[in-house]
Image (cartoon, rainbow, N blue to C red):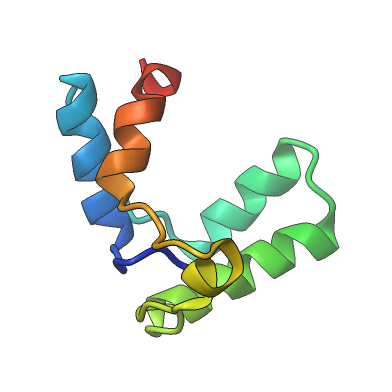
Amino acid sequence: MTGPEALATAEVVAKISTATGRPIDCIEVPETLAGDGMLAQGMSLPLAEAVLELMALIREGYGSGTMTTVGEVLGRKGRTFDAWLQEHVMAFR
């Protein structure tokens, strides 16, 4: 499910950087390094593989659109990322 906007990871990171007043970079990590890192942190192999598969789908453009599901379920429009971030910015500081 999505809110009313579809944002790329780099856009989300830029918004968090602006909201916190801290420079935050979005860095592309090669799949093999990402997988090795997840395993080194104790993630199970099936879960690490699932995360990598999900990230590959996102890079291919799946999930790049918006949906109306949030509004249909809640009976109101979904919030923008900016609105959500305004309420949760302290979690990033």
Q: Quadrant of the N terminus?
A: bottom right
Residue 45, position as x, y percentages in the image: 82, 59
Q: Is residue 91 left or right of residue 4?
A: right
Residue at the location (46% across, 67% down)? 2
Residue 42, position as x, y percentages in the image: 80, 38
Q: Is residue 54 above or below residue 76?
A: below
Residue at the location (29% across, 63% down)? 8
Residue 56, position as x, y percentages in the image: 50, 76
Q: Is residue 63 left or right of residue 45?
A: left
Q: Is residue 93 left or right of residue 13?
A: right
Residue 23, position as x, y percentages in the image: 17, 26
In the displayed image of the protein, which residue is found farthest to the front?
Answer: 75
Residue at the location (72% across, 67% down)? 49
Q: Quadrant of the C terminus?
A: top left
Residue at the location (22% across, 54% down)? 11
Q: Is residue 36 above or below residue 52?
A: above
Task: Determine the image quadrant of residue 77.
Answer: bottom left
